[in-house]
Image (cartoon, grey):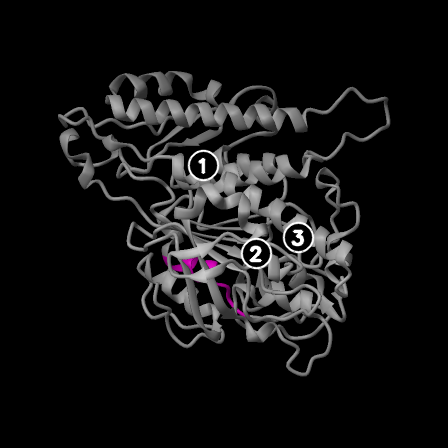
Amino acid sequence: MNSFRLDSSSTTRRIDRRTMLRAMGVSLALPSLHMMTNTPLVASETVSAPVRLAWVFFPNGTNYDRWLPKGSGTEWEFSPSLAPLAANRNDFNVLKGLAQVNAQSLGDGPGDHARSAAAFLTGAHPYKTAGSKIRVGQSADQIAAEKVGRITRLPSLELGTEEGRDAGSCDSGYACAYSNNISWRSATLPMGKEINPQNAFHRLFGGSEEKVDEKEKLMQRSILDFVTDQRRHLERVAGNEDRRKLDEYFVSIREIEYRLNQFTTPPRLPDGTTAPSAKPENITEHIRLMYDLMVLAFQTDSTRIATFMLANEGSNRTFPMIEVKEGHHDLSHHESKQDKVDKIAKIDTYYSEQLSYFLTKMRETKDADGSSLLDNSLIVYGGCISDGNRHDHHNLPALLAGRGGRGIQTGRLLEFSEYTPMNNLFTTMLEHVGIEDTIFGDGTGKVAL
């Protein structure tokens, strides 16, 4: 099956925006190209690009004193924990004063970690149960997916790095579903996240027609090998700028495949033994692969809505690569002991380094209108616990990256009144994808950006 269509009657050799390369059950989306528009080649500046929304969540709070920069407006200094983002200063705004009050106890006792993840994108208070009667609220990403998701191949993309069950209790009588999910299709239905980069890759680029033996071929060969003829024809008819975009895109596909193969090709094992999981053991590589997949998903317009949990809330992951061998959650209850405080700061800094990798790649990837993917995105990076030792849910650590279609000035520290609902930020973000006046959770309106 070949969905490649070229309008030969057009002097601009136009192809449909939804064009995909297909062969042997493989469906390969394409990046936004000039030839997908009706505009003359000399007027590429008139091409429009969609706005993408993404939320990147980290657990367990921060060492807040070392996380929050000092200053205001454009006059602020990088904090130690955000120092790795210095080269990205003009890619984001720092937000101060936001809160998710419904992550507080409100009479339900302990369970701040479960409430943190559950309330992060919903602004709703989760019903305390360790059973099946979970209830919280629809999340911001799924409100967007419900309204604009039908435009793209995938309504939304949910990624993570840690698996976790939804059944049973994970935090003081709260169901595990609360701790392990930030995306909720409805008040009672969490969206399962994909933690295996290979599965996420095939979800984006593997066709639904695949058979088992064809999946095995995909494990051994490049997905580009299956669409060689279509690819060559497309490159022949494309203009210079489109050929450059296609070349960059295909190189990035090859690079991700190579890295996936490094971590997913099973070794020869004795009979009766089980091959290791396809999930990379190297957490840095795992995080960066997931970030790369988000870039590709946005670049190909496979989806415009994504969430990424760097770890589940309450995660006790260790970070030996930065000499932190104790669990993250255990360290977050530091009781002001300096050695633990210092290690939490190391983890905060490590996550900032990975974010810098992602934002740089988004900035360097060209979009349909000649600007960058980051210019046409709004990406929240943050958590729903401020200080991990105090378990507070106001003055949340939050960055907003991107310009939302080049309409938002970046490089600033924006201070809102204390306890401003974080959902007001989300309402403003939804407006940038054409969803007007959506107030949900504990939201009260919009914020000025």
Q: Tell me how far mark 2 sits from mark 1, CA to CA.
A: 27 Å
Residue 145 in the magenta stretch? The answer is: yes
Residue lying at 51% horizontally and 59% vertically, measured from the top left: 398
Instruction: Give the residue type at disc 1.
Output: Lys
Q: Position of residue 365 (x, y in %)?
A: 38, 35
Residue tagged 1: 361
Whole-percent x and y of residue 20?
37, 32
The residue segment tinted magenta is: 137-147
**In this view, 355 is above or below 390:** above
Q: Position of residue 151 (x, y in %)?
A: 35, 49
Dot 3 falls on a residue whose secondary structure is helix
Circle number at residue 345:
3
Q: Position of residue 60 (x, y in %)?
A: 67, 59
The numbered mark at residue 191 is 2
- The amino acid marked with disc number 3 is Ala
Residue at x 54% of width, y 35% of height: 201
In the image, 274 versus 173, the foreground residue is 173
Query: Gap in Å between the C-alphas at discs 2 and 3?
Result: 31 Å
User: Callout 2: few (<14), some (14-19), or many (20+) C-alpha neighbours within 10 Å?
Assistant: some
Magenta stretch encompasses residue 13 = no
Asked if one can make out residue 160 in the rendered structure from this viewpoint, the answer is no
Closer mark to the observer between disc 3 and disc 1: 3
Q: Given contact means CB atoms under 8 Å apart, are the residues at marks 3 and 1 in contact?
A: no
Closer to the N terminus: mark 2 or mark 1?
A: 2
Q: Which of pointers 2 and 1 indicates the residue nearer the eye?
A: 1
| Residue found at x 33% / y 33% | 19
Local crowd at mark 3 within 10 Å, few (<14), some, or many (≥20)? some
